[in-house]
Amino acid sequence: MRTLKKSWVGIVAILVSIPVFLVPFAFIILTAMKGKLDAADLGFTWPKKIELWDNIVGVVQARDGQALVAFINSTVLTVASVTLLVILASMVAFVLQRRPSRWNGLINFLVLSGLIIPPAVVPTITVLQGLQLFGTLPGLILIEVAFGMSFCVLLFRAFLATIPREVDEAAIIDGAGTLRLFFQVIFPLLRSVVITVIVVQSVVIFNDFTNPLYFLPGDANATVQLTLFNFQSEFNTSWNLLFTDILLITIPPLVMFLFFNRQIVAGLASGSVKG
């Protein structure tokens, strides 16, 4: 009886969530397929004439091809940031989990503070200016790594708690040093949570709007989210091009979630029960 009740609850939840997610996405697609005048009505109607390809060309050619530069910038930003997050967060989590010390309490407090305390824009800009990294892609990469580190450390640490310490002891007996133990023995066992971190953080960083706006000013440094400004102004907005740009920005994260959905769930649930 309980199983049947849970099944019905799950079915109802799915039926309710479908319009919540699909209706806005359908509206984006329909508006992206319309011409400028047709899209200005912002109606949930079929386009009088399908002009999706013309809109895509218009988005790509806007402001001397800034959209292509933005995609390159966002790709470099995402790949570099996620790579550093995976390596650094997994190493920090390994040390916290396997090498307890009197500093663990303070470090855990700092990790949790990174999730609770909102980032301060002005002090961060001051620090970047002191390091001569303000307005540069490396500076923004460090910002994304710093802001995502706490979540990734907690995720890796929860998964490392499920790996028996006997694995470490066997590797040490075989003569493995600390770096070899981590990279050749422990890190391959983190595959599911690594995929989770890669997908989740890639979507977060690729779709980030505020950090590039504050810490990476300038048209040459634009990321994909900032290209939305190209099609709206105080007196005029090209809704067809705006929604086409939104559609193009949405596709990469959507594809990642479709292909790695099971791995994401497995990685998030892997550390929930300690083995």
Image (cartoon, helix red, strand yellow):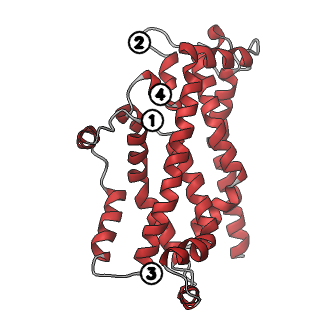
Is disc 4 surrounded by few (<14), some (14 to 19) or many (20+) residues within 10 Å? many
Q: Quarter of the image for the C terminus: give it.
A: bottom right
| Badge 1 vs badge 3, beta-carbon distance below 8 Å | no
Marks 4 and 2, the one that precedes in the sequence: 4
Name the residue carrying label 2: 234
Amino acid type of the residue tagged 3 in the rendering: Arg
Marks 2 and 1, the one that precedes in the sequence: 1
- Front label number (4 vs 2): 4
- Front label number (1 vs 4): 4
Q: Quarter of the image for the N terminus: give it.
A: bottom right
- Front label number (1 vs 3): 3
Is disc 2 surrounded by few (<14), some (14 to 19) or many (20+) residues within 10 Å? few
| Badge 1 vs badge 4, beta-carbon distance below 8 Å | no
Task: Give coordinates of residue 15: x percent, y percent.
Answer: 69, 50
Tell me the number on the disc at residue 222: 4
Please determine whether, in this image, residue 23 is positioned above or below residue 240. below
Q: Left of 182 or right of it: where is 47?
A: right
Tell me the number on the disc at residue 181: none
The span from disc 1 to disc 4 (Cα, nearest Å) is 10 Å
Task: Give coordinates of residue 114: x percent, y percent.
Answer: 34, 58
Amino acid type of the residue tagged 2 in the rendering: Glu
Tell me the number on the disc at residue 209: 1
